[in-house]
Image (cartoon, rainbow, N blue to C red):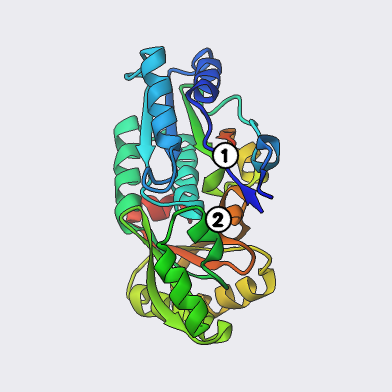
Amino acid sequence: MFSTSSPSPHDFVEVYKRLLKKHKKIFSIHISSDLSAVMKSALIARDLLDAKEKIEIFDSRSGTMGTGFMVIAVARALEKGYSSGKILRILSFLKESIRLYGTIDTLKYLRRSGRVPAIANFASRLLMIKPMLGINNGVVGMIGISFTRYGSLREITRRVTRDFKRERWVMVSIIHTLGFDESRKILKRLQGPLNIVYSMITKCTPAVGAHTGPGLIGIIVSKLDREIADLFI
Amino acid sequence: MAKKAEKRTAGTYVGNTGSDDFAIVTDSASDITKEIALKYNISIVPI
């Protein structure tokens, strides 16, 4: 059984110090502060360096490619020469807009890391259900149940279609742990009804997989406004 | 027995530069791949 540990403030101090030798400002974008102590370490490091003006630390209130989308959007915005203010507006928009619809085979791993209550794991094992999960305001929660894996995958796909089919521009990432073929099928299914301007299939890093175990499939999706869509078209 | 994931397996410091003025830092829980990190010069702090 693997576990993870947050980087220390010292880890961040080293990275920030190195980058500030070459750059005037840093955007530091991280997993929800309700899911990890990463934000805390980053904030301590910034205080230690007395660099509040130079380091913008942003709590994504999300995780995995929810945070990743924000990082990619900022990278593309910087390529286009966007101002710091414009980038912060993009980050705020995405923070409010990004949704996660996921399913996993078992809650065992999330319970061990304290990210879901023990009672939820007990109930899912007792009833042999496949939990569907979402991230709401930075916290992982159950959004539904199914009795089969196929049913849970179909249901999260249906919900994403229902919630985003009217949006003019959408970006989607299918995340998985050992589920590439299922991910590819889901993305193909979403490409019909949704106007997807940017999509990717991502295998979760051990930082995420250690908490979900094998069998995670998640759909990270966000509506975009014109300014953000332009970054991806 | 629980085994702590070694930090080097969870991510890598890859980015040295962002744009001329700005740099980007994230953590490995963002699931940013090494390819994307290299493409955009993003620094990833491993978890």
- Expressed as whole percent of the image width and height from the top left, the position of residue B40 reads 58, 37
Q: Amino acid at mark 1?
A: Ile
On screen, A96 above or below A217? above
Image quarter of the N terminus of chain A: bottom right
| Chain ID at mark 1 | B
Crowd band around label 2 with a 10 angstrom C-alpha radius: few (<14), some (14–19), many (20+): many
On screen, A97 above or below A120? above
Residue of label 2: A211
What's the CA distance linking mark 1 and mark 2? Answer: 12 Å
Name the residue at the front extreme: B1
Q: Is residue A105 left or right of residue A44?
A: right
Residue of label 1: B47
Q: Amino acid at mark 2?
A: His
Q: Which type of secondary structure does the marked residue at label 1 adopt?
A: loop
**Is residue A200 something one can see in this rendering?**
no
- Expressed as whole percent of the image width and height from the top left, the position of residue A157 reads 47, 78
- Expressed as whole percent of the image width and height from the top left, the position of residue A209 reads 60, 56
